Image (cartoon, grey):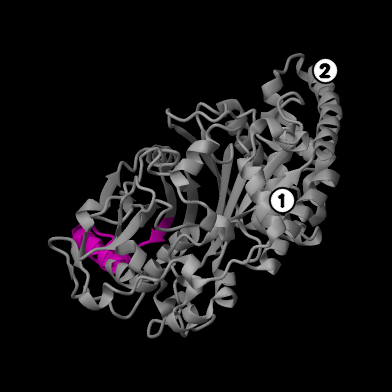
Amino acid sequence: MLSLDLYRSSMLTCRFAVPATLLPVESYTKLQQTVESAISRILLEHPLLRVGLRGEHSRMPAFVELDAVDFSRHIEWRHLDGGKDYDIELEALIKRRLNIKVEQPETAPAWRILILSIESGGFIDIIWEWGHSHADGISAKTFHEDMLRHLNGNNNSVPEEFNPETRILTIPLARQRDLLPSLHSLCDFPVGIGFTLATLWNEFKPAVLQAKSKVELRAAWAPLRPGHYASEYRHFGISHIALQNIITACRVHRTTLTGLLQALAHASLACRLSDEQARAFRGSTIVNWRPLMRRALNEKAKAEVRDVDLVRTMGNYMTTVDHVFDEEWVTKIRTASVINDSSHRALKHSEDKRCEPEEYFKDQEMVERRMLALQSLIWPVAKTVRGDLVKRLDEGTKNDQMGLMKFISDFRALLKERLEKPRSHSVAVSNIGVIDGKAPSSLSDIKNSVEGASDAFTGANSRWSIDKSIFSISSEVHGAALGACLVAAKDGELYVSCGWQENAVSTDLGGGLTGGLGVVAKVLRTGSGPMSIAPRFAVPI
Protein backbone atom coordinates (compact mmCIF):
# COMPACT_ATOMS: atom_id res chain seq x y z
CA MET A 1 0.00 0.00 0.00
CA LEU A 2 2.80 2.41 0.88
CA SER A 3 4.70 1.76 -2.33
CA LEU A 4 1.58 2.50 -4.42
CA ASP A 5 0.71 5.59 -2.34
CA LEU A 6 -2.62 4.08 -1.26
CA TYR A 7 -1.88 4.75 2.42
CA ARG A 8 0.63 6.93 4.25
CA SER A 9 0.92 6.35 7.99
CA SER A 10 -0.46 4.91 11.24
CA MET A 11 0.29 6.38 14.65
CA LEU A 12 -0.33 5.91 18.34
CA THR A 13 0.12 8.97 20.53
CA CYS A 14 0.64 8.48 24.28
CA ARG A 15 0.92 11.20 26.90
CA PHE A 16 3.61 10.29 29.43
CA ALA A 17 3.59 12.07 32.80
CA VAL A 18 7.23 12.95 33.47
CA PRO A 19 8.83 12.50 36.93
CA ALA A 20 9.44 15.78 38.76
CA THR A 21 13.21 15.32 38.69
CA LEU A 22 13.25 15.48 34.88
CA LEU A 23 10.97 18.50 34.47
CA PRO A 24 13.41 21.42 35.01
CA VAL A 25 14.89 22.98 31.89
CA GLU A 26 18.38 22.03 32.99
CA SER A 27 17.28 18.36 33.01
CA TYR A 28 16.14 18.36 29.39
CA THR A 29 19.26 16.59 28.11
CA LYS A 30 18.84 13.96 30.81
CA LEU A 31 15.19 13.56 29.80
CA GLN A 32 16.17 12.96 26.18
CA GLN A 33 18.83 10.46 27.14
CA THR A 34 16.43 8.59 29.44
CA VAL A 35 13.74 8.30 26.77
CA GLU A 36 16.08 7.32 23.96
CA SER A 37 17.77 4.73 26.17
CA ALA A 38 14.33 3.17 26.78
CA ILE A 39 13.65 3.19 23.03
CA SER A 40 16.98 1.47 22.36
CA ARG A 41 16.06 -1.33 24.79
CA ILE A 42 12.75 -1.80 22.96
CA LEU A 43 14.56 -2.11 19.64
CA LEU A 44 16.87 -4.75 21.07
CA GLU A 45 13.83 -6.74 22.21
CA HIS A 46 11.79 -6.49 18.99
CA PRO A 47 13.61 -7.53 15.78
CA LEU A 48 11.11 -6.00 13.30
CA LEU A 49 11.94 -2.51 14.61
CA ARG A 50 15.49 -2.84 13.29
CA VAL A 51 15.05 -4.16 9.76
CA GLY A 52 14.89 -2.43 6.41
CA LEU A 53 12.84 -3.46 3.38
CA ARG A 54 14.56 -4.57 0.17
CA GLY A 55 12.64 -4.34 -3.10
CA GLU A 56 9.78 -2.13 -1.92
CA HIS A 57 8.42 -1.85 -5.47
CA SER A 58 9.06 -5.46 -6.46
CA ARG A 59 6.79 -8.53 -6.45
CA MET A 60 8.85 -10.15 -3.67
CA PRO A 61 10.06 -7.58 -1.09
CA ALA A 62 12.13 -8.89 1.81
CA PHE A 63 13.25 -7.68 5.24
CA VAL A 64 16.94 -6.86 5.68
CA GLU A 65 18.56 -7.03 9.12
CA LEU A 66 20.48 -3.87 9.99
CA ASP A 67 23.79 -3.43 11.78
CA ALA A 68 22.73 -0.15 13.38
CA VAL A 69 19.83 2.30 13.73
CA ASP A 70 20.50 6.05 13.65
CA PHE A 71 18.03 7.76 16.01
CA SER A 72 18.69 11.16 14.41
CA ARG A 73 17.01 9.73 11.32
CA HIS A 74 13.95 8.46 13.22
CA ILE A 75 13.38 10.51 16.39
CA GLU A 76 12.54 14.21 16.55
CA TRP A 77 12.13 16.30 19.71
CA ARG A 78 9.93 19.38 19.43
CA HIS A 79 8.98 21.99 22.05
CA LEU A 80 5.68 23.79 21.37
CA ASP A 81 4.33 27.15 22.51
CA GLY A 82 2.36 26.63 25.73
CA GLY A 83 0.30 29.77 25.08
CA LYS A 84 -1.81 28.13 22.37
CA ASP A 85 -4.58 25.56 22.84
CA TYR A 86 -2.27 22.58 22.84
CA ASP A 87 -4.89 19.87 22.31
CA ILE A 88 -6.25 21.64 19.22
CA GLU A 89 -2.70 22.04 17.94
CA LEU A 90 -2.04 18.34 18.61
CA GLU A 91 -5.05 17.25 16.57
CA ALA A 92 -3.96 19.45 13.65
CA LEU A 93 -0.43 18.05 13.92
CA ILE A 94 -1.69 14.46 13.85
CA LYS A 95 -3.66 15.24 10.69
CA ARG A 96 -0.58 16.71 9.01
CA ARG A 97 1.58 13.76 10.00
CA LEU A 98 -0.96 11.24 8.69
CA ASN A 99 -0.43 12.74 5.25
CA ILE A 100 3.36 12.27 5.37
CA LYS A 101 4.42 8.86 4.10
CA VAL A 102 6.44 6.62 6.40
CA GLU A 103 9.38 5.71 4.21
CA GLN A 104 10.45 2.05 4.06
CA PRO A 105 14.00 2.01 2.66
CA GLU A 106 16.44 -0.88 2.68
CA THR A 107 18.84 0.97 5.00
CA ALA A 108 16.46 1.90 7.83
CA PRO A 109 13.32 0.60 9.56
CA ALA A 110 9.87 1.96 8.62
CA TRP A 111 8.98 3.91 11.75
CA ARG A 112 9.49 7.38 13.16
CA ILE A 113 8.89 9.10 16.50
CA LEU A 114 7.90 12.68 17.28
CA ILE A 115 8.22 13.73 20.94
CA LEU A 116 6.36 16.87 21.97
CA SER A 117 6.61 19.00 25.09
CA ILE A 118 5.20 22.34 26.25
CA GLU A 119 6.27 24.83 28.91
CA SER A 120 5.17 23.74 32.41
CA GLY A 121 3.19 20.85 30.91
CA GLY A 122 4.56 18.14 33.15
CA PHE A 123 4.34 15.62 30.31
CA ILE A 124 5.65 14.61 26.91
CA ASP A 125 3.54 13.26 24.04
CA ILE A 126 5.30 10.42 22.24
CA ILE A 127 3.89 9.87 18.75
CA TRP A 128 5.02 6.53 17.31
CA GLU A 129 4.37 6.29 13.57
CA TRP A 130 4.79 3.20 11.43
CA GLY A 131 4.04 1.55 8.11
CA HIS A 132 2.00 -1.64 7.99
CA SER A 133 4.76 -3.69 6.36
CA HIS A 134 6.54 -3.76 9.72
CA ALA A 135 3.89 -3.47 12.44
CA ASP A 136 0.22 -3.07 13.37
CA GLY A 137 -1.86 -1.35 16.05
CA ILE A 138 -1.16 -3.97 18.71
CA SER A 139 2.56 -3.55 18.00
CA ALA A 140 2.19 0.17 18.74
CA LYS A 141 0.35 -0.61 21.97
CA THR A 142 3.16 -2.99 22.94
CA PHE A 143 5.75 -0.33 22.09
CA HIS A 144 4.26 2.22 24.48
CA GLU A 145 3.68 -0.30 27.28
CA ASP A 146 7.27 -1.50 26.91
CA MET A 147 8.40 2.12 26.95
CA LEU A 148 6.67 2.64 30.30
CA ARG A 149 8.15 -0.60 31.65
CA HIS A 150 11.68 0.47 30.77
CA LEU A 151 11.25 4.04 32.02
CA ASN A 152 10.09 2.73 35.39
CA GLY A 153 12.58 -0.14 35.46
CA ASN A 154 15.34 -0.61 37.99
CA ASN A 155 18.05 -0.38 35.33
CA ASN A 156 18.12 3.22 34.13
CA SER A 157 21.65 3.11 32.75
CA VAL A 158 22.35 3.69 29.07
CA PRO A 159 22.57 0.34 27.22
CA GLU A 160 26.13 -0.38 26.09
CA GLU A 161 24.88 -0.79 22.51
CA PHE A 162 23.56 2.81 22.44
CA ASN A 163 25.75 5.91 22.10
CA PRO A 164 23.79 8.94 23.36
CA GLU A 165 26.26 11.34 21.78
CA THR A 166 25.95 10.00 18.23
CA ARG A 167 22.41 8.68 18.89
CA ILE A 168 23.30 5.44 17.13
CA LEU A 169 22.19 2.02 18.36
CA THR A 170 24.57 -0.75 17.27
CA ILE A 171 22.91 -4.15 16.89
CA PRO A 172 25.06 -6.93 18.41
CA LEU A 173 25.81 -9.93 16.19
CA ALA A 174 23.93 -12.17 18.62
CA ARG A 175 20.76 -10.14 17.98
CA GLN A 176 21.00 -10.10 14.19
CA ARG A 177 19.51 -13.53 13.63
CA ASP A 178 16.47 -13.46 15.90
CA LEU A 179 13.82 -12.38 13.39
CA LEU A 180 10.74 -14.58 13.63
CA PRO A 181 9.65 -16.58 10.55
CA SER A 182 6.71 -15.24 8.55
CA LEU A 183 3.16 -15.75 9.85
CA HIS A 184 2.49 -18.36 7.16
CA SER A 185 5.59 -20.26 8.23
CA LEU A 186 4.47 -20.23 11.85
CA CYS A 187 0.77 -21.00 11.58
CA ASP A 188 -1.50 -23.21 9.52
CA PHE A 189 -4.35 -21.50 7.67
CA PRO A 190 -6.59 -24.33 6.42
CA VAL A 191 -9.21 -23.38 3.83
CA GLY A 192 -12.10 -25.42 2.46
CA ILE A 193 -12.83 -25.82 -1.25
CA GLY A 194 -16.14 -23.99 -0.96
CA PHE A 195 -14.60 -21.01 0.84
CA THR A 196 -11.70 -20.87 -1.61
CA LEU A 197 -13.83 -20.93 -4.76
CA ALA A 198 -16.38 -18.45 -3.41
CA THR A 199 -13.71 -15.98 -2.30
CA LEU A 200 -11.66 -16.17 -5.48
CA TRP A 201 -14.76 -15.85 -7.66
CA ASN A 202 -15.97 -12.83 -5.69
CA GLU A 203 -12.53 -11.21 -6.01
CA PHE A 204 -11.85 -11.82 -9.66
CA LYS A 205 -15.19 -12.19 -11.48
CA PRO A 206 -16.06 -9.44 -13.99
CA ALA A 207 -17.95 -6.46 -12.64
CA VAL A 208 -20.87 -7.13 -15.02
CA LEU A 209 -21.46 -10.46 -13.28
CA GLN A 210 -21.64 -9.01 -9.79
CA ALA A 211 -24.91 -10.02 -8.11
CA LYS A 212 -27.34 -7.19 -7.46
CA SER A 213 -27.29 -7.81 -3.71
CA LYS A 214 -23.51 -7.55 -3.67
CA VAL A 215 -23.48 -4.29 -5.63
CA GLU A 216 -25.87 -2.71 -3.15
CA LEU A 217 -23.38 -3.34 -0.34
CA ARG A 218 -20.55 -1.54 -2.09
CA ALA A 219 -19.70 2.05 -1.15
CA ALA A 220 -20.10 3.53 -4.63
CA TRP A 221 -20.99 6.83 -2.93
CA ALA A 222 -17.28 7.12 -2.05
CA PRO A 223 -15.48 6.66 -5.40
CA LEU A 224 -11.90 5.40 -5.54
CA ARG A 225 -9.65 8.32 -6.46
CA PRO A 226 -5.96 7.33 -6.72
CA GLY A 227 -3.39 9.89 -7.68
CA HIS A 228 -4.26 12.67 -5.24
CA TYR A 229 -3.67 11.53 -1.68
CA ALA A 230 -5.01 13.65 1.19
CA SER A 231 -6.47 12.38 4.46
CA GLU A 232 -9.04 14.24 6.54
CA TYR A 233 -9.07 13.55 10.25
CA ARG A 234 -11.04 14.22 13.44
CA HIS A 235 -10.94 12.82 16.97
CA PHE A 236 -12.73 13.28 20.27
CA GLY A 237 -12.55 11.94 23.82
CA ILE A 238 -15.16 10.22 26.00
CA SER A 239 -14.70 10.55 29.75
CA HIS A 240 -13.95 7.49 31.85
CA ILE A 241 -17.32 7.77 33.64
CA ALA A 242 -19.22 8.02 30.36
CA LEU A 243 -17.20 5.10 28.97
CA GLN A 244 -18.25 2.92 31.90
CA ASN A 245 -21.90 3.80 31.20
CA ILE A 246 -21.48 2.78 27.58
CA ILE A 247 -19.75 -0.49 28.47
CA THR A 248 -22.51 -1.30 30.95
CA ALA A 249 -25.12 -0.71 28.25
CA CYS A 250 -23.16 -2.93 25.85
CA ARG A 251 -23.10 -5.77 28.37
CA VAL A 252 -26.84 -5.45 28.94
CA HIS A 253 -27.38 -5.82 25.20
CA ARG A 254 -24.74 -8.57 24.81
CA THR A 255 -22.44 -6.64 22.55
CA THR A 256 -19.15 -4.75 22.73
CA LEU A 257 -17.91 -1.23 22.13
CA THR A 258 -16.73 -2.29 18.66
CA GLY A 259 -20.15 -3.73 17.80
CA LEU A 260 -21.90 -0.61 19.02
CA LEU A 261 -19.61 1.73 17.07
CA GLN A 262 -20.17 -0.27 13.87
CA ALA A 263 -23.95 -0.06 14.30
CA LEU A 264 -23.92 3.63 15.19
CA ALA A 265 -21.59 4.63 12.36
CA HIS A 266 -23.71 2.83 9.76
CA ALA A 267 -26.94 4.20 11.24
CA SER A 268 -25.44 7.67 10.91
CA LEU A 269 -24.49 6.97 7.27
CA ALA A 270 -28.02 5.72 6.58
CA CYS A 271 -29.40 9.02 7.91
CA ARG A 272 -26.97 11.14 5.89
CA LEU A 273 -27.01 9.31 2.55
CA SER A 274 -30.04 8.95 0.31
CA ASP A 275 -31.55 5.68 -0.89
CA GLU A 276 -30.13 6.39 -4.34
CA GLN A 277 -26.62 6.74 -2.88
CA ALA A 278 -26.67 3.65 -0.64
CA ARG A 279 -29.31 1.00 -0.06
CA ALA A 280 -27.16 -1.16 2.24
CA PHE A 281 -23.63 -1.25 3.68
CA ARG A 282 -20.69 -3.54 4.33
CA GLY A 283 -18.36 -2.74 7.22
CA SER A 284 -15.25 -4.46 8.55
CA THR A 285 -13.41 -4.87 11.84
CA ILE A 286 -9.69 -5.46 12.31
CA VAL A 287 -8.97 -8.63 14.32
CA ASN A 288 -5.72 -9.35 16.17
CA TRP A 289 -4.25 -12.77 15.30
CA ARG A 290 -1.97 -13.05 18.34
CA PRO A 291 -4.40 -14.76 20.77
CA LEU A 292 -5.03 -17.41 18.09
CA MET A 293 -1.45 -17.97 16.96
CA ARG A 294 -0.34 -20.32 19.72
CA ARG A 295 -3.04 -22.91 18.98
CA ALA A 296 -2.46 -22.63 15.22
CA LEU A 297 1.31 -23.20 15.31
CA ASN A 298 2.60 -26.01 13.14
CA GLU A 299 4.93 -28.64 14.61
CA LYS A 300 8.15 -27.04 13.37
CA ALA A 301 7.16 -23.60 14.64
CA LYS A 302 6.30 -24.91 18.12
CA ALA A 303 9.98 -25.67 18.68
CA GLU A 304 11.19 -22.40 17.14
CA VAL A 305 9.01 -20.08 19.24
CA ARG A 306 8.81 -22.11 22.45
CA ASP A 307 10.17 -19.20 24.52
CA VAL A 308 8.57 -16.36 22.53
CA ASP A 309 5.66 -14.35 23.97
CA LEU A 310 3.52 -14.31 20.84
CA VAL A 311 0.89 -12.07 22.45
CA ARG A 312 3.47 -9.27 22.76
CA THR A 313 5.36 -9.94 19.54
CA MET A 314 5.57 -7.03 17.10
CA GLY A 315 4.60 -7.58 13.49
CA ASN A 316 1.65 -7.23 11.14
CA TYR A 317 -0.50 -9.99 12.63
CA MET A 318 -4.07 -9.07 11.77
CA THR A 319 -7.06 -10.02 9.66
CA THR A 320 -10.49 -8.52 8.99
CA VAL A 321 -14.08 -9.61 9.59
CA ASP A 322 -16.95 -8.29 7.44
CA HIS A 323 -20.37 -7.18 8.67
CA VAL A 324 -23.48 -6.67 6.51
CA PHE A 325 -26.02 -3.93 7.22
CA ASP A 326 -28.78 -5.01 4.87
CA GLU A 327 -31.36 -3.05 2.92
CA GLU A 328 -34.21 -3.87 5.31
CA TRP A 329 -32.31 -2.49 8.32
CA VAL A 330 -31.18 0.64 6.46
CA THR A 331 -34.75 1.33 5.33
CA LYS A 332 -36.05 1.00 8.89
CA ILE A 333 -33.33 3.36 10.16
CA ARG A 334 -34.23 5.97 7.56
CA THR A 335 -37.96 5.67 8.19
CA ALA A 336 -37.61 6.03 11.96
CA SER A 337 -35.16 8.91 11.54
CA VAL A 338 -37.41 10.84 9.14
CA ILE A 339 -40.42 10.54 11.47
CA ASN A 340 -38.38 11.70 14.44
CA ASP A 341 -36.65 14.51 12.51
CA SER A 342 -39.93 15.81 11.11
CA SER A 343 -41.41 16.01 14.60
CA HIS A 344 -38.33 17.79 15.92
CA ARG A 345 -38.19 20.12 12.90
CA ALA A 346 -41.77 21.23 13.48
CA LEU A 347 -40.98 21.90 17.13
CA LYS A 348 -37.81 23.86 16.30
CA HIS A 349 -39.62 25.84 13.60
CA SER A 350 -42.33 26.90 16.02
CA GLU A 351 -39.68 27.93 18.57
CA ASP A 352 -36.92 29.39 16.40
CA LYS A 353 -38.83 30.12 13.14
CA ARG A 354 -35.76 29.07 11.15
CA CYS A 355 -33.33 26.15 11.37
CA GLU A 356 -30.99 24.90 8.61
CA PRO A 357 -30.99 21.11 7.92
CA GLU A 358 -27.30 20.65 8.86
CA GLU A 359 -28.03 22.20 12.25
CA TYR A 360 -30.17 19.20 13.09
CA PHE A 361 -27.10 16.98 13.02
CA LYS A 362 -25.23 19.35 15.35
CA ASP A 363 -28.18 19.84 17.72
CA GLN A 364 -27.53 17.89 20.93
CA GLU A 365 -31.25 17.42 21.61
CA MET A 366 -31.81 16.36 18.01
CA VAL A 367 -29.11 13.65 18.06
CA GLU A 368 -30.32 12.42 21.44
CA ARG A 369 -33.92 12.17 20.23
CA ARG A 370 -32.81 10.35 17.10
CA MET A 371 -30.85 7.74 19.03
CA LEU A 372 -33.71 7.15 21.43
CA ALA A 373 -35.93 6.55 18.40
CA LEU A 374 -33.40 4.24 16.74
CA GLN A 375 -32.05 2.26 19.70
CA SER A 376 -34.42 -0.68 19.14
CA LEU A 377 -32.79 -1.04 15.70
CA ILE A 378 -29.20 -0.30 16.75
CA TRP A 379 -28.72 -2.72 19.63
CA PRO A 380 -29.70 -5.93 17.75
CA VAL A 381 -27.30 -5.09 14.92
CA ALA A 382 -24.55 -4.26 17.42
CA LYS A 383 -25.12 -7.72 18.90
CA THR A 384 -24.88 -9.28 15.42
CA VAL A 385 -21.52 -7.57 14.83
CA ARG A 386 -20.23 -9.08 18.06
CA GLY A 387 -21.50 -12.47 16.84
CA ASP A 388 -19.51 -12.07 13.60
CA LEU A 389 -16.35 -11.46 15.64
CA VAL A 390 -16.98 -14.33 18.05
CA LYS A 391 -17.51 -16.69 15.12
CA ARG A 392 -14.17 -15.67 13.59
CA LEU A 393 -12.36 -16.21 16.89
CA ASP A 394 -14.06 -19.57 17.44
CA GLU A 395 -13.03 -20.75 13.97
CA GLY A 396 -9.44 -19.70 14.61
CA THR A 397 -7.32 -19.61 11.46
CA LYS A 398 -9.71 -21.80 9.44
CA ASN A 399 -11.26 -20.32 6.27
CA ASP A 400 -9.59 -16.94 6.56
CA GLN A 401 -8.32 -14.77 3.71
CA MET A 402 -4.76 -15.36 5.00
CA GLY A 403 -5.06 -18.95 3.80
CA LEU A 404 -5.53 -17.73 0.23
CA MET A 405 -2.40 -15.58 0.07
CA LYS A 406 -0.53 -18.44 -1.60
CA PHE A 407 -2.70 -17.93 -4.69
CA ILE A 408 -1.55 -14.30 -5.05
CA SER A 409 1.74 -13.99 -6.91
CA ASP A 410 1.77 -10.17 -7.14
CA PHE A 411 0.03 -8.14 -4.44
CA ARG A 412 0.78 -4.85 -6.18
CA ALA A 413 -1.08 -6.08 -9.26
CA LEU A 414 -3.99 -7.19 -7.06
CA LEU A 415 -4.27 -3.75 -5.45
CA LYS A 416 -4.14 -2.05 -8.85
CA GLU A 417 -7.01 -4.28 -10.02
CA ARG A 418 -9.05 -3.29 -6.98
CA LEU A 419 -8.71 0.34 -7.96
CA GLU A 420 -10.77 -0.47 -11.07
CA LYS A 421 -13.73 -1.68 -8.97
CA PRO A 422 -16.22 0.14 -6.73
CA ARG A 423 -15.21 0.60 -3.11
CA SER A 424 -16.31 -2.47 -1.15
CA HIS A 425 -16.55 -1.23 2.47
CA SER A 426 -18.11 1.78 4.16
CA VAL A 427 -16.57 1.82 7.65
CA ALA A 428 -13.59 -0.09 9.08
CA VAL A 429 -13.12 -0.18 12.87
CA SER A 430 -9.84 -0.87 14.65
CA ASN A 431 -10.04 -1.14 18.44
CA ILE A 432 -6.74 -1.86 20.22
CA GLY A 433 -8.32 -1.74 23.66
CA VAL A 434 -6.86 -0.34 26.88
CA ILE A 435 -3.24 0.66 27.43
CA ASP A 436 -2.08 -0.09 30.96
CA GLY A 437 -0.29 3.15 31.66
CA LYS A 438 -0.35 3.17 35.45
CA ALA A 439 2.94 3.44 37.29
CA PRO A 440 3.67 0.41 39.51
CA SER A 441 3.23 1.10 43.21
CA SER A 442 6.37 -0.62 44.43
CA LEU A 443 9.62 1.28 44.04
CA SER A 444 11.76 -1.81 44.51
CA ASP A 445 10.04 -4.27 42.18
CA ILE A 446 7.71 -3.15 39.39
CA LYS A 447 6.52 -6.72 38.86
CA ASN A 448 5.27 -7.01 42.46
CA SER A 449 3.21 -3.89 43.01
CA VAL A 450 2.01 -2.89 46.48
CA GLU A 451 -1.76 -2.50 46.24
CA GLY A 452 -3.25 0.47 48.02
CA ALA A 453 0.11 2.04 48.80
CA SER A 454 -0.06 5.80 49.30
CA ASP A 455 1.68 8.36 47.11
CA ALA A 456 3.79 9.36 50.09
CA PHE A 457 5.09 5.78 50.37
CA THR A 458 5.55 5.03 46.68
CA GLY A 459 6.76 8.40 45.51
CA ALA A 460 4.20 8.49 42.67
CA ASN A 461 5.55 11.76 41.30
CA SER A 462 8.87 10.02 40.67
CA ARG A 463 7.25 7.45 38.40
CA TRP A 464 6.31 7.62 34.74
CA SER A 465 2.70 6.96 33.68
CA ILE A 466 0.53 7.12 30.55
CA ASP A 467 -2.48 9.39 31.03
CA LYS A 468 -3.86 9.63 27.49
CA SER A 469 -3.75 7.70 24.21
CA ILE A 470 -4.93 8.50 20.66
CA PHE A 471 -4.89 5.92 17.83
CA SER A 472 -4.91 7.32 14.28
CA ILE A 473 -4.68 5.80 10.78
CA SER A 474 -4.47 7.59 7.46
CA SER A 475 -7.16 6.82 4.90
CA GLU A 476 -6.73 3.95 2.44
CA VAL A 477 -7.47 4.87 -1.16
CA HIS A 478 -8.73 1.35 -1.92
CA GLY A 479 -10.07 0.53 1.56
CA ALA A 480 -13.12 1.51 3.59
CA ALA A 481 -14.55 4.96 2.98
CA LEU A 482 -14.11 5.87 6.65
CA GLY A 483 -11.77 4.40 9.23
CA ALA A 484 -12.54 4.58 12.96
CA CYS A 485 -9.93 3.86 15.65
CA LEU A 486 -10.42 3.37 19.39
CA VAL A 487 -8.02 3.28 22.32
CA ALA A 488 -8.16 4.20 26.00
CA ALA A 489 -5.56 4.72 28.68
CA LYS A 490 -6.39 2.75 31.83
CA ASP A 491 -8.79 4.75 34.04
CA GLY A 492 -8.68 7.54 31.46
CA GLU A 493 -10.60 8.78 28.45
CA LEU A 494 -11.52 6.69 25.43
CA TYR A 495 -10.39 8.42 22.24
CA VAL A 496 -12.27 7.83 19.01
CA SER A 497 -10.68 9.01 15.76
CA CYS A 498 -12.06 9.00 12.25
CA GLY A 499 -10.25 9.46 8.93
CA TRP A 500 -11.28 9.55 5.27
CA GLN A 501 -9.89 10.43 1.86
CA GLU A 502 -10.43 14.11 1.17
CA ASN A 503 -11.62 13.87 -2.43
CA ALA A 504 -13.71 10.69 -1.95
CA VAL A 505 -15.79 11.56 1.13
CA SER A 506 -17.10 15.07 1.75
CA THR A 507 -16.09 16.94 4.88
CA ASP A 508 -19.78 17.42 5.68
CA LEU A 509 -20.27 13.65 5.71
CA GLY A 510 -17.06 12.59 7.46
CA GLY A 511 -16.96 15.49 9.88
CA GLY A 512 -20.71 15.28 10.48
CA LEU A 513 -20.53 11.58 11.34
CA THR A 514 -17.64 12.16 13.75
CA GLY A 515 -19.35 15.23 15.21
CA GLY A 516 -22.56 13.27 15.75
CA LEU A 517 -20.66 10.68 17.75
CA GLY A 518 -19.09 13.47 19.78
CA VAL A 519 -22.42 15.17 20.53
CA VAL A 520 -23.84 12.11 22.25
CA ALA A 521 -20.54 11.60 24.07
CA LYS A 522 -21.08 15.11 25.43
CA VAL A 523 -24.60 14.15 26.53
CA LEU A 524 -23.18 11.15 28.37
CA ARG A 525 -20.54 13.30 30.08
CA THR A 526 -23.15 15.68 31.44
CA GLY A 527 -25.51 12.86 32.40
CA SER A 528 -28.50 14.93 31.26
CA GLY A 529 -31.59 14.10 29.26
CA PRO A 530 -33.60 10.94 28.83
CA MET A 531 -30.54 8.93 27.82
CA SER A 532 -29.30 9.01 31.43
CA ILE A 533 -32.40 7.31 32.84
CA ALA A 534 -30.80 3.85 33.01
CA PRO A 535 -27.80 2.03 31.54
CA ARG A 536 -29.92 0.32 28.87
CA PHE A 537 -30.84 3.76 27.51
CA ALA A 538 -27.32 5.20 27.60
CA VAL A 539 -26.95 4.94 23.85
CA PRO A 540 -24.03 6.86 22.26
CA ILE A 541 -23.62 7.68 18.60
For disc 2, the neighbor class at 10 Å (few under 14, some 14 to 19, many from 20) is few
Q: Give the side of residue 372 with respect to residue 210, left or right.
A: right
Report the front residue among 310 and 536. Answer: 310
Q: Which mark is residue 350?
A: 2
Compared to residue 348, the image places residue 155 above or below, namely: below
The residues colored magenta run: 14-39
Mark 2 or mark 1: name the one nearer the start of the chain: 1
Quarter-of-image position of residue 271:
top right
Where disc 2 sits, the SS reads: helix
Q: Which residue is drawn at 82% across and 40% down?
A: 329
Report the front residue among 7 and 454. Answer: 7
Q: Does the magenta stretch include residue 25?
A: yes
Q: Residue 260 carries which label?
A: 1
Report the front residue among 37 and 344. Answer: 37
What count of labels does the image hold? Answer: 2
Q: Give percent across and percent down for residue 334.
A: 81, 31
Q: What residue type is labelled 1?
A: Leu
Q: Give percent across and percent down for residue 366.
A: 75, 32
Quarter-of-image position of residue 222:
top right
Q: Is residue 213 magenta?
A: no
Is residue 475 at least partly visible in the picture?
no
For disc 1, the neighbor class at 10 Å (few under 14, some 14 to 19, many from 20) is many
Q: Main secondary structure of the magenta part?
A: helix
Compared to residue 134, the image places residue 438 above or below, namely: below
